């Protein structure tokens, strides 16, 4: 069985691409570099870490895993930002 190439996807917040929409959440100052991010993506996708490190996965699979990992992080950040704003607005009432 052959899988078709998946279509490009978009994620919007208030009609704006989520990566272009600033979140005003807590600034942690945490910066990660690519090797760490790749390994986190591997773990998040339940992929075999040994296979990842031994380059047994195709670049397409690895890129997809990293892109999904990044998007999930951004969505979580924006969700937390929206929840924080809702709580702040509710406390003003």
Image (cartoon, grey):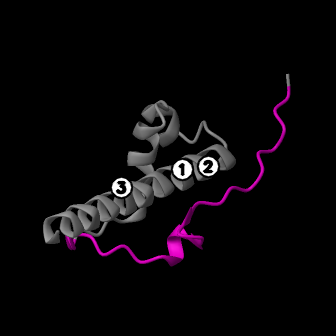
Tag 1: Cα neighbours inside 10 Å, few (<14), some, or many (≥20)? Answer: some
**Above or below, comparing residue 23 to residue 63 in the picture:** below
Q: Say what secondary structure mark 3 lies in.
A: helix
Q: Say what secondary structure mark 2 lies in.
A: helix
Check contact, mark 1 vs mark 2: CB within 8 A. yes
**Disc 1 versus disc 3: nearer the observer:** 1
22 part of magenta stretch: yes
Left or right of 6 on screen, residue 50? left
Check contact, mark 3 vs mark 2: CB within 8 A. no
Q: Residue 39's x, y, as percent?
A: 40, 47
State the quadrant of the N terminus: top right
* Separation of residues labelled 1 and 3 (CA atoms): 15 Å
Q: Residue 83's x, y, as percent?
A: 29, 58
- Residue denoted by label 3: 36
Q: Residue 61's x, y, as percent?
A: 64, 43
Tag 3: Cα neighbours inside 10 Å, few (<14), some, or many (≥20)? Answer: few
Q: Residue at x 47, y 30 (%)?
A: 48
Question: If you read the primary sequence from the N terminus, does the residue marked by circle 3 or circle 2 appear first?
Answer: 3
Left or right of 68 on screen, residue 89? left
Q: Say what secondary structure mark 1 lies in.
A: helix
- Residue denoted by label 1: 68
Q: Residue at x 81, y 44 (%)?
A: 5
Q: Residue 56's x, y, as percent?
A: 60, 36
* Separation of residues labelled 3 and 2 (CA atoms): 16 Å
As drawn, the residue found furthest toward the front would be: 93
Left or right of 13 on screen, residue 28? left
- Residue denoted by label 2: 64
State the quadrant of the C terminus: bottom left
Stretch in magenta: 2-29
Q: Residue at x 84, y 38 (%)?
A: 4
Question: If you read the primary sequence from the N terminus, does the residue marked by circle 1 or circle 3 appear first?
Answer: 3
Check contact, mark 1 vs mark 3: CB within 8 A. no
């Amino acid at each position: 069985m052959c899988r078709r190439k998946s279509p490009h996807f978009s994620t919007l917040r208030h009609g704006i691409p989520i990566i272009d929409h600033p979140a005003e959440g807590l600034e942690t100052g945490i910066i990660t570099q690519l090797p760490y991010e790749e390994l986190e993506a591997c773990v998040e996708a339940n992929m075999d870490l040994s296979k990842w490190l031994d380059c047994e996965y195709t670049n397409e699979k690895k890129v997809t895993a990293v892109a999904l990992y990044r998007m999930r992080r951004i969505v979580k950040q924006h969700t937390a930002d929206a929840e924080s704003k809702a709580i702040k607005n509710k406390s003003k009432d």
